Image (cartoon, helix red, strand yellow):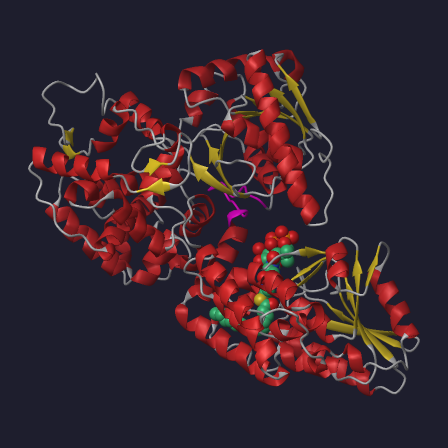
């Protein structure tokens, strides 16, 4: 039964019961409509309370039903809302858990709203590429004014109950049972006038210059949410609440949503939404997985190394209220780390404070303890080592801690690409060793690559994946190979960016094209931010540059393949990026962030091309995008072939959450599917034939096979992997 109804004296309680989040599917809408009409006609009913089963009011329209573009065909949410709002009997929403999207829109059509103190409300439709199209953009501004409504709708912000009360969204916040409180309120208001409680009948009140306000909002949104259409549609819809009568405003909502659907962005964002949820559902070839292996509860942790990554990880653990011992090797580094963690926690507390939430670390370090003594970590449940990327150092630490720690403690290494098995091999419990690849800044970035080595046990995986969730991360399980998934795909992308410079581009041409595509940052800006020396060191270790390059090796060739030495040449000149005040760009000061194109680089590139007699040509944005992205996608297919990622969805989750890929394009593998695999294949094949010294351009076996079998939908790619080697 999707909707149930019971009576408590003169009050009819209508409960949505559609696990897990009481989403408004077509069936729920039909049942809700029917029950509401019956209750409103029943002479023994004098007031109605609307609530959700299992402590959740409603998470909105059922996104799983959005597959067709015909929207809701039978009873729409707004049909129900209109009916509720015009009801002659008072209707009270009892909000527990969540009232999101269509759920809040339903509550806004009720005459009163009571919320439990732990409830959250919001209109997060923008985050899945649409707008609140069940009256939300028309009713909310009438209730709380334009600026507050626009902010909530455009950012899709979750608002806690206390803030919702301050804003005027809910009428009461209770610490006890919200349904009992709503029934109580319903009884009190029987027979009282309801006219000023019907939001659609109220005027939108404002004392601002509306034209200027919306112009500014649009300008800001075009920059902040570059390329995304939903935020702009949200602004247009809220503007309609001022300019049009209510019912025309509703029509505008429908027109805007229909036009959004034609952009393909809602489909991509909804794919991204479900891919993220599926990433948590890891399964091993043995059948062991998220639904049959229980994680160990982690109460105490230690972080070794308080550099940039370690500080972020300590902050992240502390934010989640997990006890953490932060360990460094000398007093000076310990004190610097402590200062940095305090400052990060203060910023986090300030953010929470603004959201009306309190934190355990508001007045200090929360559950963090700093020490130089390895002995102090002996009883912790889990250790995260976060020293710099050096195999020798990591092995030394793992050897040492595996002797100190209690036998069942887990040993995690924060590495962006080192071999987990090699690290595990020096411990006395390789089954408890796992990689946790955090992304910088670790207290902010949502992505966590959980790297399973060949010895790692299912319980270790379950525990680390669960810890990731507790930290508010999107944890994705990947296999162990050099650079894992995200960075492995990035390598040919960055390589291609270098070749584009040789072939005629300037760094800003490449960055502009990729930023226009939607990346948060182009490859050259990204390298300047991370520091060019990071890649330089790694290339030296691999013998690609520096003393270990055999004499007589041509400058632009390594092991018979094309090589671009420009980044190495910049490093030799100390152009390490932002921290040096110069890299691919110049900066206003050492550590500055404002990049400007550097005439020196233009000169340098021209001389370089002349020296190597390279004929440059004009390269347009389309070529830049295809060259950079198709090799990245090709690497994604190889990763699937090798069984390093379980599914294309997992790869997309990694790119959406860790590499600034625009979510409204779904992720690189989704992008390949929507571009057409044949196009990707043919372009790569053509380019590879013209450049056989660039192996990353050679189309992978899986890509070729998928094209050959007629480009099955992305969900079915896995079945084509059937007999290939699965390393997960
Ligand atoms: C092609 C485009 C067509 C457009 C058609 C437009 C029609 C417009 C009509 C009316 C306007 C109203 C629109 C809406 O309401 S859209 C939905 C707005 N709501 C949301 O965006 C909320 C999304 N959900 C969440 O944010 C979270 O899930 C949460 C906060 C509710 C709960 O978080 P958490 O406890 O962390 O659990 P999970 O995220 O893991 O979710 C649990 C489970 O529930 C599924 N789920 C969540 N929300 C929905 C939903 N709205 N519809 C369907 N399913 C939902 C989620 O997928 C998980 O499922 P599981 O993986 O199978 O366990």
The stretch drawn in magenta includes residue 270 = no
Q: Where is 572 relative to 482, above or below?
A: above
Q: Residue at x 40, y 27 (%)?
A: 418
Position in image of residue 188 (x %, y %) = 92, 73
Residue 703 seen from this side: yes
Position in image of residue 719 (x %, y %) = 38, 54
Image-based side of 420 in relation to 524, left or right: right
Quarter of the image for the N terminus: give it: bottom right
Front residue of 454/9: it is 9
Q: Residue at x 25, y 23 (%)?
A: 572
Position in image of residue 498 (x %, y %) = 23, 39
Q: Indicate which quadrant contains ligand 1.
A: bottom right
Majority SS type along the magenta span: loop
The stretch drawn in magenta includes residue 285 = yes
Q: Residue at x 56, y 64 (%)?
A: 125
Image-based side of 535 in relation to 692, left or right: right
Front residue of 242/503: it is 242
Q: Where is 42 relative to 148, above or below?
A: below
Front residue of 49/606: it is 606
């Amino acid at each position: 039964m999707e909707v149930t109804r019971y009576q408590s004296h003169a009050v009819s309680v209508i409960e949505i019961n559609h696990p897990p989040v009481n989403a408004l599917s077509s069936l729920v809408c039909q049942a809700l409509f029917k029950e509401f009409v019956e209750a409103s006609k029943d002479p023994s009913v004098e007031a109605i309370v609307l609530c959700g089963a299992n402590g959740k009011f409603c998470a909105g329209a059922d996104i799983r039903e959005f597959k067709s573009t015909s929207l809701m065909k039978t009873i729409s949410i707004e049909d129900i809302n209109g009916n509720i709002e015009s009801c002659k009997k008072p209707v009270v929403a009892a909000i527990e858990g969540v009232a999101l999207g269509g759920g809040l829109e339903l509550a806004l059509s009720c005459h009163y709203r009571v919320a439990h103190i732990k409830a959250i409300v919001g209109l997060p439709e923008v985050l899945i590429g649409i707008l609140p199209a069940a009256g939300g953009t028309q009713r909310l501004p009438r209730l709380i004014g334009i600026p507050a409504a626009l902010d909530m709708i455009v950012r899709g912000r979750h608002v806690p109950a206390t803030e919702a009360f301050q804003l005027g969204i809910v009428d009461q916040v209770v610490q006890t049972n919200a349904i009992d409180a709503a029934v109580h309120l319903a009884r009190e208001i029987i027979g009282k006038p309801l006219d000023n409680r019907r939001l659609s009948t109220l005027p939108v009140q404002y004392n601002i210059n509306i034209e200027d306000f919306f112009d500014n909002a649009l300008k800001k949104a075009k920059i902040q949410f570059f390329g995304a259409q939903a935020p702009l549609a949200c602004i247009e819809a809220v503007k309609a609440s001022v300019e049009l009568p209510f019912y025309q405003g509703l029509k505008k909502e429908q027109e805007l949503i229909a036009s959004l659907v034609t952009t393909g962005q809602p489909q991509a964002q909804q794919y991204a939404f479900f891919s993220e949820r599926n990433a948590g559902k890891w399964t091993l070839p043995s059948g062991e997985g998220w639904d049959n292996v229980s994680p160990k509860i982690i109460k105490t942790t230690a972080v070794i190394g308080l550099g940039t990554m370690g500080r972020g990880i300590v902050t992240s653990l502390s934010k989640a209220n997990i006890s953490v011992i932060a360990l460094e090797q000398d007093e000076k580094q310990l004190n610097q780390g402590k200062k940095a963690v305090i400052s990060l926690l203060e910023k986090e507390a300030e953010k929470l404070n603004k959201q009306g939430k309190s934190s355990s670390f508001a007045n200090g370090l929360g559950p963090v303890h700093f020490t130089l003594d390895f002995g102090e970590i002996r009883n912790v449940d889990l250790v995260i080592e976060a020293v710099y990327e050096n195999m020798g150092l990591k092995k030394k630490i793992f050897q040492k801690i595996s002797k100190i720690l209690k036998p069942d403690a887990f040993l995690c290494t924060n590495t962006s690409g080192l071999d987990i098995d090699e690290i595990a091999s020096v411990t006395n419990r390789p089954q408890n060793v796992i990689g946790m690849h955090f992304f910088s800044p670790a207290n902010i970035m949502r992505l966590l690559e959980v790297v399973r080595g060949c010895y790692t046990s299912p319980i270790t995986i379950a525990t680390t994946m669960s810890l990731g969730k507790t930290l508010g991360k999107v944890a994705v399980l990947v296999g162990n190979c050099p650079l894992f998934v995200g960075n492995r795909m990035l390598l040919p992308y960055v390589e291609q960016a270098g070749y584009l410079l040789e072939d005629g581009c300037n760094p800003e041409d490449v960055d502009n094209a990729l930023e226009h595509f939607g990346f948060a940052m182009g490859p050259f800006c990204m390298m300047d931010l991370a520091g060019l020396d990071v890649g330089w060191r790694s290339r030296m270790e691999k013998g690609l540059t520096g003393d270990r390059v055999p004499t007589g090796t041509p400058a632009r060739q390594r092991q018979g393949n094309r090589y671009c030495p420009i980044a190495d040449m910049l490093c030799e000149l100390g152009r390490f990026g932002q921290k040096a005040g110069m890299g691919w760009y110049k900066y206003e000061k050492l550590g500055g962030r404002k990049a400007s194109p550097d005439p020196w680089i233009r000169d340098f590139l021209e001389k370089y091309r002349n020296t190597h007699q390279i004929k440059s040509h004009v390269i347009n944005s389309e070529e830049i995008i295809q060259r950079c992205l198709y090799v990245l996608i090709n690497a994604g297919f190889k990763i699937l072939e090798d069984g390093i990622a379980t599914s294309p969805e997992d790869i997309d989750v990694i790119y959406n959450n860790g590499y600034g890929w625009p979510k409204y394009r779904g992720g690189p593998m989704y992008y390949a599917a929507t571009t057409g695999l044949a196009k990707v294949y043919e372009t790569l094949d053509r380019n590879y034939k013209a450049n056989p010294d660039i192996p990353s351009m050679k189309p992978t076996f899986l890509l070729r096979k998928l094209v050959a079998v007629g480009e099955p939908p992305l969900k079915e790619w896995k079945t084509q992997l059937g007999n290939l080697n699965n390393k997960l």
